[in-house]
Image (tube, rainbow, N blue to C red):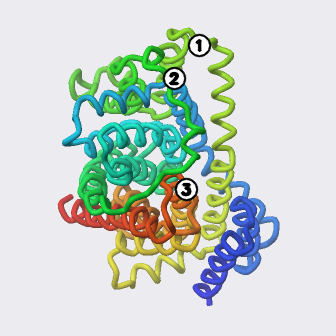
């Protein structure tokens, strides 16, 4: 009976979001209240669980996500991402242009959320395609692949950060394993798959005119641009390397703890980049701060959705549903990581949003991390891979690709949807391979 109630709650959630078009934050809260009552929890306990789940989930990721949004906004508006794209374009030339686009998306995708990166880089895709007289999708798909992989797999993006907090995974190990999986996924689903798209002839659209490209003279230097984008990763890795290089003395240990903390790394990066990409380029501090305010506004709803998903997860835990699920999952014939991928992929097909699918799966799959001998870092990546599967007409990214590239629905399914599914399946294969080797 417990399992049937769970399925009913998930169906209600899917129906509210997809058919009734209810805001995801409201839908999660409604289903959390419904689930608590159906599982026999006292009303006061239901409210307490919702407050705890929302607070605990946001408490572990909100600061990092907000700082990441600020950094991404600065990287976008300063022209740093544009500089990286131009440099890769000049470095690789026409023969390896798809790999240049993929590498650009990979670097820019670390601080930028997918939609922001898409809008920012789409003019560059058009420019490169026209300069080399190459098919638009052939040039653009590798970059979109890299942006999508970084958004779904790796911190500091919302879904991976939420999963790391829920499952108490190690952010550095998760990032490291994620890179091992992400690189082949990007190459296969990006440049190699793009070869099959040469015959698809999109015309583009007028939407491209809404995106602006800064003059070459106003762009920051390439070293400044790359370091500003990658500095959080560099600082966190440095925090882990310091004790190895300089021993475990008091000073070394203290500095390592500070640098290895993601919040400190992100804050330090935002402070430095505010100067290197802003003040040093003559931008007024007030204008930079206005950009940060806009960045937070852009991801405010994402934060609320993540928090409400955490509230639903807490209902599942406090109602003892997770214990019942744990018994069922432990007796499942499927490997836990494969089960996690399949559950998240189903949610992605139903809900559309990769972020919503990932944070929803966190609540459903919480028992796997608690009651099975599962590598939490790989569990995060399995869910991340599943959250990218089968993007179709209920996903905003699907329509972004269709409209900007001037595709038909059939062409978008043939290109974008297949690419996302390839990334997801390759990601699953990578997770299972690492699980076998570790």
Whether residue 363 is situated above or below residue 53 in the rendered picture: below
**Residue sitting at x 68%, y 24%:** 290
First reached walking from the N terminus: tag 3 or tag 1: 1
First reached walking from the N terminus: tag 1 or tag 2: 2
User: Relative to the observer, which residue lies in front, 46 or 184?
Assistant: 184
Name the spot of residue 55 as percent of width and height, x first: 67, 49
Q: Which residue is mark 1?
A: 283
Judge from the rendering whether residue 123 lies leftward or rightward of residue 313; answer left or right: left
Q: Which residue is mark 3?
A: 403
Whether residue 337 is situated above or below residue 6 in the rendered picture: above
CA distance for labels 3 and 1: 33 Å
User: Relative to the observer, which residue lies in front, 367 or 33?
Assistant: 33
Residue contact at pointers 3 and 1, CB within 8 angstroms: no
**Residue sitting at x 26%, y 66%:** 429
Image quarter in which the N terminus is found: bottom right
Mark 3 element type: helix
Residue contact at pointers 1 and 2, CB within 8 angstroms: yes
Judge from the rendering whether residue 274 lies leftward or rightward of residue 105; answer left or right: right
Other-residue count near label 2 (Cα within 10 Å), few / some / many at <14 / 14–19 / ≥20: many
Q: Name the outermost residue toward the bottom.
A: 1
User: Relative to the observer, which residue lies in front, 436 or 230?
Assistant: 230
Other-residue count near label 3 (Cα within 10 Å), few / some / many at <14 / 14–19 / ≥20: some
Image quarter in which the C terminus is found: bottom left
CA distance for labels 1 and 2: 9 Å
């Amino acid at each position: 009976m417990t399992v049937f109630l769970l399925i009913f709650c998930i169906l209600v959630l899917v129906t509210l979001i997809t058919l009734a078009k209810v805001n995801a934050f409201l839908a999660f809260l409604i289903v959390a209240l419904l689930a608590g009552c159906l599982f026999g929890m006292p009303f006061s306990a239901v409210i307490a669980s919702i407050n705890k789940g929302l607070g605990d989930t946001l408490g572990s990721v909100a600061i990092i996500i907000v700082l990441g949004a600020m950094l991404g906004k600065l990287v976008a508006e300063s022209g740093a991402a544009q500089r990286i794209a131009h440099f890769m374009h000049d470095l690789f030339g026409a023969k390896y242009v798809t790999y240049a686009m993929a590498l650009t998306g990979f670097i820019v995708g670390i601080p930028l959320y997918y939609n922001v990166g898409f809008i920012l880089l789409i003019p560059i895709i058009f420019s490169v395609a026209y300069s080399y007289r190459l098919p638009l999708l052939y040039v653009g798909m590798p970059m979109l692949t890299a942006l999508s992989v970084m958004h779904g797999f790796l911190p500091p993006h919302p879904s991976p950060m939420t999963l790391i907090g829920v499952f108490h995974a190690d952010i550095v190990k998760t990032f490291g394993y994620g890179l091992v999986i992400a690189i082949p996924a990007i190459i296969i689903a990006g440049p190699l798959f793009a070869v099959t798209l040469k015959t698809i002839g999109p015309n583009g659209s007028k939407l491209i005119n809404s995106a602006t490209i800064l003059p070459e003279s106003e762009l920051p230097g390439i070293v400044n641009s790359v370091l500003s984008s990658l500095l959080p990763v560099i600082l966190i890795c440095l925090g882990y390397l310091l004790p190895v290089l300089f021993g475990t003395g008091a000073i070394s240990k203290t500095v390592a703890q500070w640098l290895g903390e993601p919040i400190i790394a992100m804050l330090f990066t935002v402070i430095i980049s505010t100067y290197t990409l802003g003040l040093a380029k003559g931008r007024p501090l007030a204008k930079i701060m206005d950009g940060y305010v806009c960045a937070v506004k852009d991801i405010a709803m994402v934060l609320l959705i993540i928090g409400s998903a955490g509230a639903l997860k807490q209902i599942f835990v406090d109602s003892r549903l997770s214990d019942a699920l744990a018994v069922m999952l432990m007796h499942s014939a499927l490997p836990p990581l494969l089960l996690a991928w399949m559950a998240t992929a189903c949610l992605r097909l139903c809900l559309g949003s990769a972020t919503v699918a990932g944070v929803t799966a966190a609540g459903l799959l919480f028992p796997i991390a608690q009651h099975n001998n599962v590598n939490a870092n790989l569990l995060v990546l399995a869910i991340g891979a599943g959250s990218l599967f089968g993007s179709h007409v209920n996903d905003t990214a699907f329509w972004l690709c269709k409209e900007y590239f001037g595709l038909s629905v059939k062409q978008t399914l043939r290109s974008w949807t297949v690419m996302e599914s390839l990334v997801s399946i390759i990601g699953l294969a990578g997770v299972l391979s690492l699980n076998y080797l570790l």
